[in-house]
Amino acid sequence: MACSLFGGPCLRPGCLWPCPAPDGGRIDPVGAGVNIQTRRKVMTLILFSTTDLEGHRGLEFAQLLISIERNVRNGADVRLYVLLQNCASAKLAKLRKWVPPYCRLTAVAGRCSLSTARNRLIAAALAEAVPDNDDVIGFPDDDCWYPDHVGTSLADTFATLPDLDVLICRVKRQPDDEPIEAEEVRQAAVREVVRLTTSNSMFVRGSVFLRVGEFDPDLGVGTVNGGGEDTDYAIRALLAAGRAGMVNRPLIAHPEPDQASAAKYYRGALIVLARHAGRRPALMFEFLRKLLVGGYFVLRRKLSPRLLLGAFSAAGRNFLSDASQPLHLGSKAFR
């Protein structure tokens, strides 16, 4: 049955609906029995997510929250920032009474783009406390979820590999739950960062997060460019990182990228590659390859010629340009 607040399985104590556990039982109210103050100090996993309360992802978002709670119960030190869209102030006040101590809720009455939502959450996090250099930052979508031990596994991996600044992985609807072994973290190739990385499959060390800055508000779902914000952030993180690592197996639950989604977000991705093409030869190769991919999409009727020409035009205006790069978190705009 649906919860009257989130539209998915209920997560609050005292609710009429039970919270279903993956094993068919019932989990306790979120946050109950968790003493964050007395837990051994570990790297904090700081997560930023947003959802539309009038959208169709209530069940998926509830599953994400349940999965994060299970990670907390398994020892992960988590700080979760959530922006609720289409959420009135009265509903926000009601929800804040029920969230666990590691969750910070904020809201907007209407809709905003994904990049804008994340940037609001980043600003809220910085206003509360600047992340430690060794904290781990992630940006889960509202339709992904985490295996039970991925939080502690990520913290252990970043602690074991002090030169690791960015970690990317694969995603799958049913991911692996085996701990990450330090030996399986290899250097990420530029092509993997460009072609595989989404917000769900990317984790960055706090020091790099502070250097990279905010998401580009001109990119992403809810903007005219429709996508590319994850790729842009991943490339900037790669360029700022001492070492970017790759785990070549699915660690996070999310539908795998396909040609349909690649065509849908083609314009934004091409703009991003045009901007960064001059930074490394491998990025120039990815840009030229993306131009050819656009032609392939047209031939396969996944992209119209009009949209392809529009993407080419937008990419041309942004070629080798840093004019629209986001502000860094140390700038006055964030103080």
Image (tube, grey):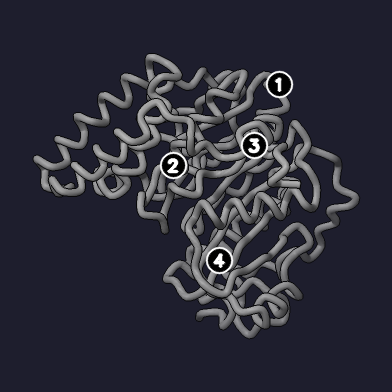
- Relative image position of residue 17 (x, y in whole percent): 60, 81
Tag in front: 1 or 2: 1
Mark 3 is on which residue type? His
Mark 4 is on which residue type? Ala
Q: How far apart are marks 1 and 2 (CA)?
A: 24 Å
Circle 2 is placed at which residue position?
171
Question: Residue at 63% of width from left, 60% of height from top?
Answer: 82
Question: Tag 2 or tag 4, which sits nearer the N-term?
Answer: 4
Circle 1 is placed at which residue position?
162
Is 323 positioned to the left or the right of 285 in the image?
right
Question: Tag 2 or tag 3, which sits nearer the N-term?
Answer: 2
Q: Distance between the residues labelled 3 and 1?
A: 23 Å
Circle 3 is placed at which residue position?
328
Q: How far apart are marks 4 and 2 (CA)?
A: 19 Å
Residue toward you, 308 or 22: 308
Circle 4 is placed at which residue position?
62
Decide: few, some or many residues near mark 1? Use Cα within 10 Å; few <14, some 14-19, many ≥20: few
